[in-house]
Amino acid sequence: MKKTLLFLLVLLVVFSTSFSAQAGGALKFAVQVEPAGFDPNLATAFGSHRILEHIYEGLLSFDEKMDIVPGLAESYEVPEPTKIVFHLRKNAFFHDGTPFTAEDVLFTFQRIRDPSFASPAASYYSEVLSITAPDPYTVVFVLKVPMINSLLLNFAGVNSAIVCKKYVESGANMQLQTNGTGPFTLKEYAAGNYIALQKNDHYYIPELPCLDTLTFVVIPEEISRSAALRNGDVDMAQIMEPLSLNTFSQQRFVIYRVSTLPYLLLGINNAVKPFDNVLVRRALSYAISREEIVEMVAFGEGTVTGPLNPSLQTWALLPEAFDEYTYNPDKAKALLKEAGYPNGFSFEAVTFAQYSLDKIGEAIQAQLALVGITMKVNVAEFGIFVKRWREIDFEAFLSLNGGSTEPDIQFYRTFKSDGATNKFNFKNAKVDELLEKGRQALDLEERVTIYQSLQKLLVEENPFLFLYSPNNLYVSSLAVKDFVPMSNQSLIMLKKTWLDK
Amino acid sequence: MEWKRLWRKFARNPLNIVSLVVFTVFLTMAVFPQIFTQFEPNRMNSAVRMISPTGSHVFGTDQFGRDIYSRVVHGVRETLFIAFLSIVFACVFGTGLGIVSGYYGRWADQIVMRLMDAMFAFPTIILALFIIALFGASQKNLIIALGIVYTPIFTRTVRSSTISIKEFLYIKAAKALGKGDFSIMAKEVLPNLTSILIVSFTTNFSTAVLSEASLSFLGLGVPPPTPTLGGMVGQGSNFLLSAPWIALFPGLFIALIVLSINIVGDGLRDVLDPRY
Amino acid sequence: MIASYVFGRILSAIPTILILTFIVFLAIHLVPGDYIDIMLGTQNYLTDEQLTELYQQYGLDQPFVAQYGIWLKNLITFDFGTSLRTGQKVSALIVEKLPVTFELAFLALFFSLVFGIPLGITSAVKRNRFGDYVVRIFGLVGLSAPAFWIGAILIVAVSGLFQDYTLFGFVSLQTDMGKNLQILLIPSVTLGLMLAAQIMRMTRSSMLDVLSQEYVKVAKAKGVAKSKVIYRHALKNALIPVITTAGIQFGYLMGGTILMENMFALPGLGRLLLQSVNQRDYPVIQGIVLFIGVFIVLMNILVDILYTLIDPRIDLK
């Protein structure tokens, strides 16, 4: 066996282009942030999700194009608008050898929906009436309202990943120990240093994963991460500063870029003066050149976005469709005059020092100054920012919001008058009505019409300003093959990645 | 003439003179930045983004097309202002606490010094971080934060000097004559502390410049768009390979400021210390 | 005599440490935003009931003074609590991270002495002559620059010039000594430079002090060779204050490692502290602050004792 592998290796070195994948190899991947706890049903930290998605799996999953594909459920069907039936895999095992069954699915969702457990995923399933398992490999979800379209995506999220009933009940500390069904197992977590994952030899897709080990090395500083890559201390790294890309020569490195779903926004408190006036909000949109911000701050590595990411061709209205997106300081001034602020006004935007938000603040500050608006940028510590955001203790803020391929998920929580993340004091009966209609409609065409009129309405009302979606950038050495970055920032395609060295 | 003699002693060393001149230039920059620059430090210009040092932009420009040289000059102003006032703050409070603690001894000394010890036993950056997180990042709060951080250093120095000064005969005499404690502290003890205070002031002034820079580097400095030297290094260090001028020049200016203060400080100590 | 002195010092240090931990506890709770806020960020979809439940689970629903009381009570049984963020024992975390920071601080101190003392001596001996100026300018130009600036430049320079040099991917001293020292070399030199300026100035003034004293003048008058005077007689005495202050500096260095650990991705105590402050991981912050505080107090006591052993004229008081 070993000999054939060696033979294959030699062959691959010789004809490396003619083979698709090669087993083996140890990949070191430099990341910026560390995980904070390993319980998939609890973790909210970005750093945790990027690790846990290799260890745990949900009933469904995403492919490279962000389409829904089978995960632990081999297939699913929707016999009625309020019913989903999952057919589970029969050949999946947890890392400790326990076979995966419907028991674990029931247990996991009971765990998620238990209010005392306080899972961030609980609210996704609040409209679920019952979950049953007619046999060990079938699970049936019955809903109170027909909202299958928006529900399905959640099954692919890390927070809905399936945990092992037997393992959890044995009293294991799920924040420290792991036992999933995913392609990799947790080998070692050296806090502040690295997280080492190891190939799961019993993965239900025998040819996956290709790598023997996958190590995430934590390097917080950007220059340090790119230096580590240049020196070969790591094979691959996430790059946050687009200009750094110029320093990696094409002869030695491969650059990956993907337009992401999360979007940067200028949040507005719609209840305070002068932002309670829609004319003022609209004036802001005309006064800001989103293109210039993308160019100045991100060196063009970003996509100006309307309420939905332009890559979602089925749903999204492109920025060109909105007059408010054309940079027009004169119109902005006219609107301000009409609203009763001919000499502009002054406000404070609170933000925090991540995702270049401070620089975006500086750019907007300069642009608004041209129409007579003074914006103070308060770069607060993250904890302070979150508290002020939660308590709606701001005039405006700059932040990054998570995005989705599903309009209901993108909009419902954020724009519904009583939405969990509607921190904008935005209340609009027409918007609420469209949100409910979009959630319950089943016909695709009908939904597209609903959500397109919603997008138009949202830009007219401007409860906050969508700015742009930053590109995610990765750089690897030439030896790294078959890595595909994804627009939801997930790294799950590393299971198909291999090393040619 | 006492001051004349001291000045001659100071001027004997050409290095002292050079450093004093350099520092004076920085001081002038801080007070009148306009006469050194032709561009607005915060004016963005998308036509000249990221250009390397040339004739019109001697230190180059940043990603917003702002002139680095103008920003560095205004950064000197911000940095010196904050460092200076924070040390004044520390000097005033530290001297007050130190004299009281050293003069009265006993429980006053115990309370003050235990508090100072507690502050000493804590990384300065984290201490300043707390204060700024608590009250928000602004010029005023930065001065207070650094001032608090540097207070224990002055308290300790002043306290130990006061303890020895207290034993001087004429102070005992003043006490015997029935002079009040406050008047003794202000009129007899304080003048004796002058030279030690001048020396501590310059030493800590230079470290305060570095501390301010570190805090701004960590993003805890004055809010944008006001330029600070440390903040510019912080924002520019990501570009160290692609556009090195953004971080190199402000860093160099920090080094030069600290260097000139250090040498002037050494010179002052040589002059004021009777042993030399 | 010494035993009772040490005992007295340690006893008087206890209120200091308690004040310290209380100030920190108060400060970190006064800063807006708590652990739960930061954990959930702006993707907070929890209902009010769920939030209340979460605060209860982490014991954060208790009033602030009660929380401090619980922490103190547990401290008596040497229970430092567990990290809110990772669920690891605080004591285990400190034990795990301490060697990294300790090694970094120790190496930095070593380099600061190696650079600082010879420069300081040269400067003092050649006082107000050309050599003094050269040494002070060259010494201080490098030494006056901010450590984070030097560190960033060194990272870029080393990774550009020596492509095989391992800068990142920390391994412990026991695992691979060569690699460990290679990785720690650049950060400890950077940190050492910061301190070397102080050591140099201290050596200079201390040397000048000793050189002006009677016995050195007598030795000179007696015709003892100049270099011998400097190195045999003067240096020995001049170094006492330098070494002892270096000992105190070691405590501060522990704090100074924060920036370096972050920049060079070293898994040390400083970075853990910064991270815990950012995450409001209260037990970890308290544990580290307590540890550093105790360490610095003990270090000060040790230095004072050393002082008296070296120089019997100084009285322990």
Image (cartoon, rainbow, N blue to C red):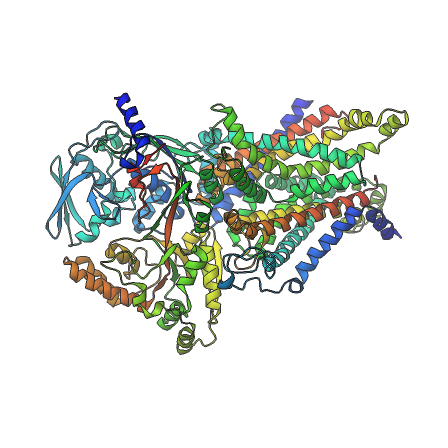
Quadrant where the image shows the C terminus of chain A: top left
Residue at 24% from the left image edge and 45% from the top image edge = A63
B84 and B80: which one is in front?
A: B80
Q: Is residue A224 left or right of residue B141?
A: left
Residue at 37% from the left image edge and 73% from the top image edge = A279
Occupied quadrant, residue C181: top right
B229 and A141: which one is in front?
A: B229
Q: Position of residue C20 (x, y in %)?
A: 56, 39
Occupied quadrant, residue A490: top left
Position of A134 relative to A286 (above/below): above
The number of numbered badges drawn on the structure is: 0
The answer to whether any part of residue A408 appears in the image is: yes
B56 and A315: which one is in front?
A: B56
Q: Is residue A466 left or right of residue B183?
A: left
Position of B44 relative to C93 (above/below): below
Q: Position of residue C233 (x, y in %)?
A: 80, 25
Q: Position of residue B121 (x, y in %)?
A: 59, 38
B93 and A138: which one is in front?
A: A138
Q: Position of residue B120 (x, y in %)?
A: 61, 40
Quadrant where the image shows the N terminus of chain A: top left
Q: Is residue A434 left or right of residue A230?
A: left
Residue at 76% from the left image edge and 24% from the top image edge = C312
The answer to whether any part of residue A172 appears in the image is: no
Extreme-front residue of the structure: A14
